[in-house]
Image (tube, grey):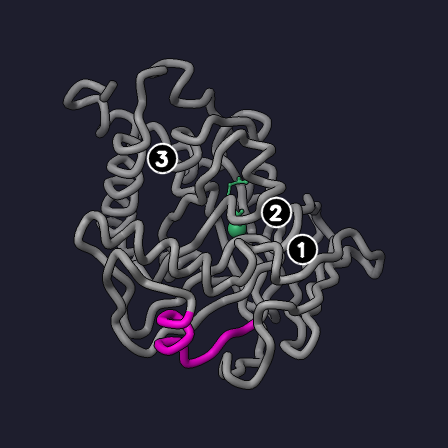
Amino acid sequence: MAITKGVDLEIVEYLYSAEKECREVVKVTDRYPELSFDDAYLIQEKLIERREKEGARKIGLKLGLTSKAKQQMMGVHEAIYGYLTDDMLALEWEPLDFTDFIHPKAEPEIAFLIEEDLEGTNVTAEDVLRVTKFVAPAIEIIDSRYLNFKFTLADVIADNCSSSKFLIGSKWMSPKDLDLGQLGMVMSKNGEVFQTGSSAAVLGHPAASVAWAVNKLGEVGKGIKKGDVILSGAVSEAISFEPNDTILVQFAELGSVTFSCKSST
Ligand code: OOG
Ligand code: MG
């Protein structure tokens, strides 16, 4: 069942202000249990439009729930997607301010830099690799606007899939020059290893995850564009961080990406 007309904009304002004020809020489906996935993607779209009105610019996409482990955790069989905007890009050499977040977590991802438009409903991982100029190591910082980071699938889609910030490492490689399907990954916090994994965790191959997103967008006549940055979805579980923490993600062959969080004073 779909939500009634007009409610969508109310939800957009609800989520927009929660993000702006770094405030966690009760999940949308507590009030609107009838919220469908289609409703949720529509709200996500309008939420991005709302941010574009304030000057943000769409620069690409992010995938979520692309690993079997995460899908099982949520009891779903499908990935989800959200949008990246220019104001989400964080830089390795500028410490993050914890007061910009609610309860952030960092996760290791592969970034795709796209050099050709791609659209369709039968797109394969090979097609994606063909239009990918570079891949790079990346960290996504997710920061659900919902209380205790707890939500249903419709809730998280509406909340632009928990997106907050992302960082891209400095080593960019052509996907032709490495075995992108089997890259080992180590994520550490303050020098201690917290997560290990392989890029194969992302739907078998990170390019398959991007292909899934292109096909999903293809169903509504959209696609990906030259210049887009696309985050593959997490290679392992996310880890939380606090002021003074330093997170480092290292990928075999593809190098590393890191950030620190400022002290709280
Ligand atoms: C949803 C977003 C998940 C990923 O890479 O799997 C995501 C969440 O877990 O909050 O970005
Ligand atoms: Mg992610």
Type of the residue with mark 2: Phe
For this view, does 34 lie left or right of residue 18? left
**In the depicted view, which residue is nearer to us: 246 or 140?**
140
Q: Residue at (54%, 38%) from the top-left corner?
A: 71
Alpha carbon separation for disc pair 1 and 2: 7 Å
Type of the residue with mark 1: Lys
The answer to which quarter of the image holds residue 78 is top left
- Residue that mark 3 sits on: 158
Mark 3 and mark 1 in contact? Answer it, CB < 8 Å.
no
**Boundaries of the magenta span:** 126-136
Q: Which x, y percent locates residue 264?
A: 69, 46
Q: Which comes before the other along the chain, label 1 or label 2?
A: 2
Q: Which comes before the other along the chain, label 2 or label 3?
A: 2
Q: Residue at (31%, 40%) from the top-left corner?
A: 44
Crowding at mark 2 (Cα within 10 Å: few <14, some 14-19, many 20+) = some
- Residue 130 belongs to magenta span: yes
The answer to which quarter of the image holds residue 125 is bottom left
